[in-house]
Image: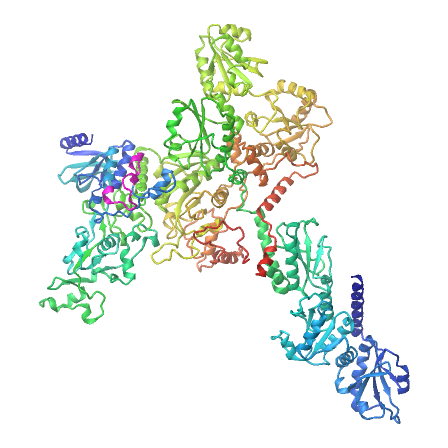
Amino acid sequence: LGLALYAGSLCVASSAAFLYRDYCIIGAGPSGLQAAYFLQRAGRDYIVFERSHAPGSFFALYPRHRKLISINKRYTGKSNSEFNLRHDWNSLLSHDHRLLFRRYSRDFFPDADAMVHYLEDFASLLKLRIQYNTAIVHVTLERDGQAWNGHYFLLIDQDRQNYKCSSLLVATGTWVPNVVNFPGSEYVEGYETVSINPEDFAGQTVLILGRGNSAFETAENILGVTNFIHMVSRSRVRLSWATHYVGDLRAINNGLLDTYQLKSLDGLLEGDLEDLAIIKDRKGKLHITLRFYLENRNTSAGIDSITLPQDELDNFATRAPYDRVIRCLGWKFDFSIYNRSLRMMPGKGNKKKYPQIKPNYESRGTRGLFVLGTASHSVDFRKSAGGFIHGFRYTTRAVHRLLENRHHGVPWPSTVYPITQLTNSIIKRVNEASGLYQMFSVLADIILLRENATAFEYLEEYPVGVLAELEMQTGRKAPNGLFVVIMEYGRNFSGADKDVFYYNRAVGEAQHAWQSNFLHPVIYYYKHLPTEREMRLRPPDWPLPRPDAVHHIVEDFLTDWTAPNAHILPLRRFLENCLSTDLRNFFAESCFLFTFTRQKLPPFCQQGYVRMQGLLGSEGLRRHAVEAGLLEDYILTDFSGDRPPDSHEGSQDQLLRDHAVPVRPLQHLVNAKDE
Amino acid sequence: MSAQKDRWFFSFSFLLFCASSILTRGSARLLQELSPQEYFSSLQAGRASLAYFSHNVSPGAQPFLEQIENSAEALQDYGISVVKVNCPKEDVSRYCGKENALRKAYLFRGNMLIREFPTDALFDVNSIVANVLFALLFNEVKYVETLADLQNIENALKGRLNMVFAYVPATGTAEHRAVMEAAFVYGTVHQFVLTTEATLLKDTGNDESDVSSARLFFCHCQRATDLAQPCRRTAMGQTLTMLNIHRHLKLMGAPLVTEVAEDPEKVSTVHLQLGLPLVFILSQKETYEADRRTAEFVAWQLLGKAGVALLSRDLVDLNILLRSNVALKTPDEGVPIKYLVLEDTDEVITLVEDKNKVKQIQEDEEEDEEDEDEKENNNQDIQDDQVVEAVSRDKKREQPLEQILVLTEETFHSALLETARTVVLFYASWEAVSLAVLRSYTEVADHLKGTEGVLLSRVNCWDWPGVCTKENVTQFPTIKIYEKGERSVMYNGMWGTEELTSFIMLSRVSCPLKLATIDEAEGYLRGELPSELSSYHHTSLLGVFSTATSEAREAFEEAGNILSGHVTMGMYFEDDALALSRKYAVSPPALLLARNGGRSMEGIALSKQSAQDMVQMIRYELLDIFPEITVQNLPRYLQLRKPFLILFSDGDIGQMESKEMLKLAKGRRRQAFVACWLNLKKTPVGRGILRAYFTTMPSLPVLTWVNLHAGGQVFKFPSEQSITEMNILSWLEKLKAGLEIPSSSLSEEDWKPPLPAYDFLQMMETAVPELPLHTSHRRGDTPERHPPESPGGDTAVPEEPSQEIKAEKVGSPGRDLRGTAPRLAAREKQGKRHSEL
């Protein structure tokens, strides 16, 4: 079929000089395939352009040492497939159970070939429409008032073939290596080409530029055979277990830290690479000096005349010459193929490797151009997982849902529940939802309240950055207030210099839940949808503006938030107080009593018992409720006539009290004293 | 015992007398002036007197004389007379003659000279009294100089008498006098020991004490049994005055722990009389022994500072919190007893010892009590959901789930194909309501054990969300019945064992059931067909159709589909349907209702009704005319949205009432209200209703009219009238005319949150004031409690003075805020007080 389509499209192209698709996706990597999957399921007109002959070409080369650092956790002790995705960092989202990564590798840190294989299967099993061997070399706009976004995207491939699209999804990743230019940088080998055979480094002294996972991965590989390895980078090393950011240095790669701190010759240095200069002596050894010295030297003099730092400072750290210098400085987005009119601008500061996009993943410069996958990481760089498969598979789905609403009038999928299910639906989601968990602080579930709070509408995994535009972006209305369910780490917990193992780091009591440090669910309540201005003026580090009320579900060691008293009860109280109602469950007997003694009924009775769905409960449960003092046993009560009608309440309170407070006899005191 | 009391009484009143006489020092001159002859002749045996001999006015002795004169009164209290003997000028006898003798005072007992004092030893009243008594009480008060002396005395006393050991820096002081005065009274009860040796004081283990001040110890030698151990000592904390010593000795004499079995408000002990607090240790049968030990331990600590009583809760009906374990009664009149919850005996002691602390603890306690009061109204962390709590309490009981097949994502579809009917309960293992239903479901499984063609199964949606989503299960619990390879029916009835069992059984039979012969139809109407269902239904519905009425038949079939599981419906449309319809005087299309196994038959003509209308009609027809209202069936009658006329009865209703009510229900007014009765034996919760309606329990049966849906007024049929149709009708007329006064009205109260939630937003703001939460622009409806921050960052808000305190509580990194990680222990409820125990 793919071939036929390909042939067909060529045919169209030759006749009309271009091939048209509603959606064009550039790149058949994980995010491109993920986007293609959703478009295909929705029956949309789309095509994926891939410059290589197979999907996932980046993974065919990288990481050079082939070990993926995305975990492939095959066992969690749970069968819940949604929950298990919380610990599966490699699978893409699909309905096909065969396409779970644990079927592709048994390794906790799988080999990159498994990823290539997986992506090939993903494309072929799902019959995604991909045009391989097509490198898009130029993208430009064609103004047209009829077009979805006021313009079409015109794409030109390496064979000058033209394509026209209404919406452009850029899933090219970041693949252009970062290079630094300094005198002598010609002696530097790049990560892309450096040998991965440790034997080639035997007895050598190596300098590695960079301090990311690729740098450490390279060092790890040759650690055992080199004389010593030095690593230089401008910033200090950031360990991902301290920052909770998977893009920082992962423990699996940090063997060099061990040898450095255990005085085994290897070492880390901080310095600006721009100030560096490398000179090669006659023996081919590489010496580190500073650009400053080179600029001041007499140009006519030979190599020997160049000042080395150790000439002035004889204990200069990197005075020993190196055999090799390797550059491992990461990648950046390829900005080169976009016409100026698309205004694809690099981000600011440490986000300059990514194009500027809005929180809905749409380019700041061009409407209708969405950036997916790794290249879209500027939204949550160094915060969440949007730059990685286990994060962008969800943001890609969110973008798809936004597009469905924008172009096809399909509102954001939602389910309407009676208000009695409010606590349950939140508990269900915070316990199993993988998108909320992986894309913490970025994607959130939205609960839109219906009038009089008798029902609500549940929207999953909406990008909170565009909360203010919710009605426009989703096609759903939020006139009666809303809850936002999101997951967060403690605000001051993570960070490069933080001790994340300090004693008493975990909060155990529900009443102190707001001080929770580990990832935990947070529910924001707004009486009105926040405005754009409020979103803009939100406190720094807050994903959302100040709510009318907020609830934290206390962090849990097992990330299992189903404890009736510590998790569910405080949540219910929060929801009750926001909605000003009583969300308790009642046995049919209580509803029966309320029906005859109250003009109004609690929602549970109103929506259950009255509709002939009362909870009769077993005799055993009834007895427990009576023992707990929460249900009165009229069989046993000696009904004395002079008892005031409200004494019922009082007796319940008494029961409650006795139940709640254990008797504390004093004998322990003396015994302890005697000791 | 009583003798001892008497003695106390005596000594106490005696001392009081002394005290008052000192204070009210009489103006009468007590100093006698006698001539030597007069003096010596007046001396009586056993009576002590202090004499001073003088030659008229000797100017040098003037100040001394004054002191002697002053002490006369004090000494008189001890039966010692003070005499100034005026020596005639020419007298040169033993006492008058020598110049030297004139500088002395002489103590006589009878006419025996005990001691002569130089006037410089009698420099003031104190020294006079002290020295005189010291001399007189030579046997009662032992003077010791060394530790060995003291120990010898102590050892000799063990098991016999208690010892009062006093140290005075010097004799003749006020303290010395106080000790001697006490010894005068108590000398026969306790052994008094006196020393002026500072080293001895130190040797007795009072290193730190200031040797310049007098000390007094009560040594409990009487209870001491171990000769090797020194007697337990209780130091007197106050300065040595006669009253203080008296108080101290009295307290030492009081029983260590008083056992109390009466209202603590009425209890009075020596301690209270002496202005000391009384500590009650609240005990109960189970912990009596331990509590007694505690009480004794505390009593020793508090000896001399407070009394300790052991109060048995079992014997006294105390209206106090069960967890209170200590009570404090202060001597102040009108101050109520404080009941406290203390965790440490130290706390009890601090409570008494440190006056400031007492206050503080009391305040704390008050605060706590307020907190607790608040908590009591405000037990946010205590479960108040009856279903959740009942399910949690039942958690440990193992469920008999063997009858119910567990389905998974893999087995779900294959399992459905194996049995004719598969009942599936979709639930979530963490969700209370679905767990409650699971319990009923196991009972259903028990009932249906061995039933052919029915498989009961369950899917835990927490494990298998995929199946649940696919089966369109959006809420828990959901029960669906899957027919092999065909449709599925969702259960929409009550979550109860009987209802569910009946539903499963009824839905096994197709609805409507096509009947082939007249005989079958007749048998069906008698409730004999289908035989296995006879116990599950009461009313049979039969649609009778002529072959021509296909439209009505289709609607009937559709209605049957909707009502499947809830009713039994049959249909007959054979050629001889007319014969059947003629028999029951209906013309097809018609509906025959056979109630009570065909004993009453009703025919209803079917016109061109839609299936929905037919469902409505059938449902309505299935309602009883005069039903017994139960928890299970009330919702069906509620849907009529009519007022209820309920006859509450303790057990079955009488035939008379039943007949009259039925007449009433059948009458014209049937449309206007629901006439029903409630059996309090079967539906005991009905008592709760009566309790809400009437302040006093009316005599049963009682007939009430409740406007459930309009106004909520409750009227009671006059009990003096008999329940007859006529009486009721005329009463209802009066009701309608507004002539009756309602007994009560149903509460209009909304269902508000039972308790407040944790206000994390406020906690954040209080704890982290720099939190830039205010920067965002707020709308007009901002709650008042979040005022905008002033430019100086001044967060002081006048109406919230407690903020700072809260901030401390919340913000301090105290151990009560955080548990250890990983937290292995369960959540402790009591984080507030220390418990190093």
Q: Is residue A274 left or right of residue B446?
A: left
| Residue A274 in the image: above or below residue A344 | below
User: Residue B335's spot in the image, x, y percent?
Assistant: 69, 58
Quadrant of the frame with the C terminus of chain A? bottom right
Among the 4 quarters of the image, the one containing residue A316: bottom left
Residue A652: x percent and y percent? 61, 42
Give above or below for A377 relative to B353.
above
Return the residue found at the far front: B227
Question: Does A134 appear above or below B666?
Answer: below
Q: Quadrant of the N terminus of chain A?
A: top left
Q: Is residue B555 magenta?
A: no
Q: Is residue B502 above or below residue A366?
A: above
Which SS type dominates the magenta stretch?
Answer: loop
Q: Which residues are magenta?
A: A91-115
Query: Farthest residue in the left direction?
Result: A300
Depth check: give the residue in front, A39 or B780.
A39
Residue B608 can be seen, yes or no = yes
